[in-house]
Image (cartoon, helix red, strand yellow):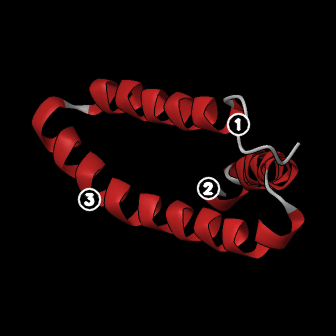
Amino acid sequence: THRYTLFPYTTLFRSATMALLMDRVRPERRGIATSTYFTGFDLGIAIGSILFGAMVQRWGFSPVWVFSALCTLLGLAGLLAPNNTGSS
């Protein structure tokens, strides 16, 4: 049943952030932006699993949840930052 708990996350979060990304890049750069998005997402899962596992062993789950939330907010802030590339 745990696979169903991730369904809203994967469908809503990933779809929404991909739509925001596509709105922020020039049409000719959308392929690069998409590949960078998915590569970064997958690398984040791989590195985060190892890093957060070590953090849980050392400090427990509470600091990991806080750190994870901060990383998510930082990434979202970067995505929502004003676009100064002139591609509006």
Mark 1 crowdedness (10 Å alpha carbons): few <14, some 14-19, many ≥20: few
In this rendering, the answer to whether 86 lies above or below 32 is: above
Q: In which quarter of the view is residue 1 placed?
A: bottom right
Q: Nearer the viewer, residue 39 or 2?
A: 39
- Residue 72 in the figure: left or right of residue 11: left
Residue designated by label 1: 84
Say which element carries label 3. helix
- Residue 1 in the figure: left or right of residue 49: right
In three-dimensional space, the C-alpha distance between marks 2 and 1, rounded to whole angstroms, equals 41 Å
Q: Nearer the viewer, residue 21 or 60?
A: 21
In three-dimensional space, the C-alpha distance between marks 2 and 3, rounded to whole angstroms, equals 20 Å
For the C terminus, the image quarter is: top right
In three-dimensional space, the C-alpha distance between marks 3 and 1, rounded to whole angstroms, equals 35 Å
Residue designated by label 3: 50
Say which element carries label 1. loop
Q: In which quarter of the view is residue 36 placed?
A: bottom right
Which is more N-terminal, label 3 or label 2? 2
The total number of labels drawn is: 3
Q: Nearer the viewer, mark 2 or mark 3?
A: 3
Residue designated by label 2: 2
Which is more N-terminal, label 1 or label 2? 2
- Residue 62 in the figure: left or right of residue 3: left
